[in-house]
Amino acid sequence: MYKVLLVDDERIILDGITAIVDWTSAETVLAGTARNGLEAYEFIAQHPPDIVISDIKMPGMDGLQLAAKVSQEYPGIRFIMLSGFGEFEYAQSAMRYGVKHYLVKPCNENKIASALREVVAELKADETKAQFVRSMKEGLVKVLPHVKEQFLKEFVTNKTYGGGDWEYYRKLFELDLGERKVRLALFQLEGAFEFEHLFAVKNIAGDILSNIVLSSTVGDHVLLVAEDANETDMHEKMELIRQTFLKYYKIDLTIALSEAGDITQARSLYKQTLECLNHRFYLGEGGLITKRDLAGTGERERKEFVFDEEKLLLEIKAGRWDGAKAGIEQYFGQIGEQRFDIHTAKSYVIQLFMAIIRLGDEEQMNAHMQKLVSLMELNTLQALQAYLQETASDICQKRYRETVGRHSAIVQKVIDSIEEQLGNPELSLGWVAHELLYMNADYLGKLFKKETGEKFSNYVMKARITKATELIERSPDVKIFELAEQLGFGDNPQYFSQVFKKYVGCTPSEYMKA
């Protein structure tokens, strides 16, 4: 039911209209009456009705003055004016205050009820319209975030969008940047992630950054447009977003931050963030990348890529991992300095990878060939280097085990030769290398020292003195010159005694007595 206030300075008219009108049939209820405009306004201030039926001519405040004041403060209230025949033109002036219904006195209950039904119909129409507008606004509020996301995505990727489109959507989104600049931040999640992780990045960024203008997901990336602020502060907040996300989701972020620019330059700023993100191939995953990190990369004059691959392969083939690792680090260092495009850099890495796996046996080579696809999918130079080092280490270690096995056999032959030739005055490294093993004496000496920890000559002397102590213990009365002859010292017992004392701490004679 719609509430009605009846206003007339004549009691008989108030009572008459109150009694004869079927208020219910007009979907109304009489909420109150007033004798003039002042009383009516006080009632309206305390109990606002939906409809006011008012006489025009009244003392204090007439109906026209009442309509004028109420239309300003309570624009939703509708008026039905009652006027005498001669006041009709006067009543028409009330239309400027939104009054559309007026009745000429005397009027019967049917005319009043008919006017009420018309006003009620208007009120219902207004309510329907208002409800429609509210529904539209509520729907807009719900879809507006999605509209903003889609607009940003199109604005930075679609060449047909320009400054005019921004002006339209700026009004729609009620965004007023004025002369303020913006920066674009592009976030890439490193490793495996679910789609909801993208929304988590946006939420964390929203909590940390108070100046976000627009945000969206573009493919597997999160894109933010934020008002420009202190550069150091922006960098710190980007790092805080990264650390917070890493803490809760154990997934690292690589963040590309553009330079400051006008919002209408969003497409070029977005391209800048893509370039920065692409540069993570050289800088590695995680962290913040800006245009400064790209400085000079496009203009750098590249030298011819020259690397002694054979030297590196020789280290792996010989099982020398320290040398092989150093060579691989040098190789990737040169690629990093050259700043090749990703495809060129990968082609160099794959070329070396193929050369390395050929050093393994057939089983190793087949196993590593199956991993070539995984190698090609890696997106940073550091990851490629780690993968290549792991492969090289696997092959190098097997080569080392094979080499050590061969070396041990050679050294054992040398040791056996020493045992057999202890009494030979000609026993020397050169003699064993040339006469017995047919090898290079320098290489044999290095190999012998590497495995035994001693030089060949020192090992021979120790072996001779150890044998001398054994002979003395078995035959305490053996002659010193006999020992010298038996152990390769020839006819120089004095030199034998000197060497014996050096290793045992006493002369052969003293050792016999002891």
Image (tube, rainbow, N blue to C red):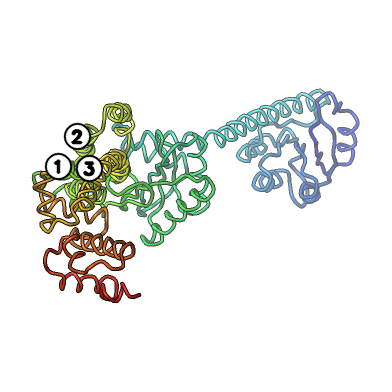
Q: CA distance from mark 1 to mark 3?
A: 11 Å
Q: Secondary structure at mark 2?
A: helix
Q: Position of residue 451 (x, y in %)?
A: 26, 53
Q: Position of residue 21 (x, y in %)?
A: 86, 28
Which residue carries the number 3 mark?
316
Q: Is residue 274 visible?
A: no
Q: Secondary structure at mark 1?
A: helix
Pointer 1 with pointer 3, Cβ within 8 A: no
Q: Residues within 10 Å of mark 1 (few under 14, many from 20)?
A: some
Q: Residue at (85%, 35%) from the top-left corner?
A: 30
Q: Position of residue 55 (x, y in %)?
A: 77, 39
Q: Position of residue 457 (x, y in %)?
A: 17, 61
Q: Is residue 90 visible?
A: yes
- The image's mark for residue 355 is 2
Quarter of the image with the N terminus in it: top right
Q: Residue at (71%, 25%) from the top-left corner?
A: 121
From the viewer's perspective, tell me whether residue 484 is left or right of residue 369: left
Which residue carries the number 1 mark?
309
What is the three-letter code of the residue carrying label 1? Glu
Q: Secondary structure at mark 3?
A: helix
From the viewer's perspective, tell me whether residue 171 is left or right of residue 59: left
Pointer 1 with pointer 2, Cβ within 8 A: yes
Q: Nearer the viewer, mark 1 or mark 3?
A: 3
- Sequence-first tag of 1 and 2: 1
- Sequence-first tag of 3 and 2: 3
- Sequence-first tag of 1 and 3: 1
Q: Residue at (26%, 75%) from the top-left corner?
A: 509
- The image's mark for residue 480 is none
Q: Choose between 192 and 294: the one closer to the eye.
A: 192
Residue 27 is drawn in which quadrant?
Answer: top right
